[in-house]
Amino acid sequence: MRPVTLRELLPARSVRRGGVVAAALVLVASAGARAADPGETGLAFLKIGVGARAAAMGEAYVAVAQDPTATYWNPAGIANVPGNEIHASHSEWISDVRYEYLAAVHGMKGHAVGVHAGLLHMGKLDRRDESANFTGTFDAYDFVVGATYAYRPLRSVEVGVTGKFLYEKIDNSSVIGFAGDLGMRYRTPLRGLVLAATATNVGPPLKFVADEFVIPFQVRMGAAYRTRRVLQGLIVSGDLRFPNDSDAKAHVGAELWVHEAIALRGGLKGGYDEEAGAIGFGVKYQNYLFDYAYVPFSESSQLGDTHRISFGWRPDWIAGSGE
């Protein structure tokens, strides 16, 4: 008996349908993007992933996200939220930098709407003159607020869009901007396998004081597979990223529910100088979920390690429902 190929498992119409949606997404997004040299993008806080679950899975999350963090990872994912859900996360970043993210989603039959807000903040910074003399202190922070809409046009396809207001303030100078995200998820006929693609931070160049810069546009493509028989509750995922300011990146991750209330997670990243992997866990209690992730940086970077924590609430949350 000859082996069965993946193409034979997936009907031609279904393969074409998912491929057309993904191709259209990339083409539309690329029209609003502009390439940048390494390190030339601004508003770098938009690159910081949200949620401890995603962080612990190596941020291989574009096909996994089906909770309020999908407002960041893939707007199409909120179409799977059946009712109301809230997410709050806190990240202890490098050099006393902290990032807070709050999101809420209201799901309806085949539709969902969500809102989110993110704040990157730090302590007082020293102001110095051209001779490095101390002249006082100043504040610096970044802020984003956005709204997301997702829709399921077909039984196996979800699409979503996010609009975002961006703000950055450093001392007495500031910049305001707008951007958008596009996303899709495709549930293949191979049960448990999901394909996804996003285009994030689609927007025009901005100007800070006299310097013009582009925001960190990125195309992500991912897949996630949830086992149904062996190791039930295991999710494996992988992402490829194509940013406008650096080379392509690869992410892989896994999550295993070892108990109906406890999940173990791990992930790896490729293409980064300072980051390589992460580990973490999740704990469910009634309708509440607590997630933790430990994300180390390389010793040569001297950036230290980061810790992420997240809290979630959903009335009908089910352990292991990552697909």
Image (cartoon, rainbow, N blue to C red):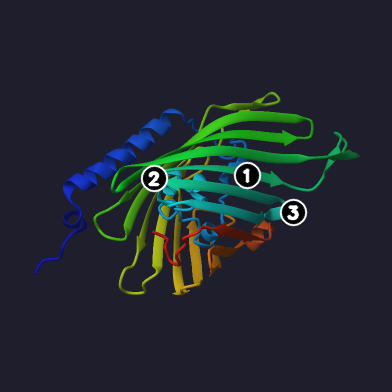
Residue underneath mark 2: 197
Of the numbered discs 3 and 1, the one sitting upstream in the chain is 3
Q: Quadrant of residue 175?
A: top right
Give the label on residue 206, or none.
none
Q: Amino acid at mark 3?
A: Asp
In the rendering, at what x and y percent does residue 148 appear? Answer: 49, 39
Furthest residue toward top: 210
Q: Quadrant of the N terminus?
A: bottom left
Residue underneath mark 3: 96
Closest to the observer, 122 or 301? 122
Residue 226, above or below 24: below
Residue underneath mark 1: 118
Q: Amino acid at mark 1?
A: Gly
Give left or right: position of 56 versus 94. left
Identify the secondary structure beneath mark 3. Answer: helix
Question: How many other residues sit within 10 Å of disc 2, few (<14), some (14-19) or many (≥20)?
Answer: many
In the rendering, at what x and y percent does residue 309 appear? Answer: 62, 60
Q: CA distance from mark 2 to mark 1?
A: 22 Å
- In front: label 3 or label 1: 1
Of the numbered discs 2 and 3, the one sitting upstream in the chain is 3
**Residue drawn at (46%, 73%) of the image:** 260
Of the numbered discs 2 and 1, the one sitting upstream in the chain is 1
Are circles 2 and 1 on residues that touch, CB within 8 Å? Answer: no
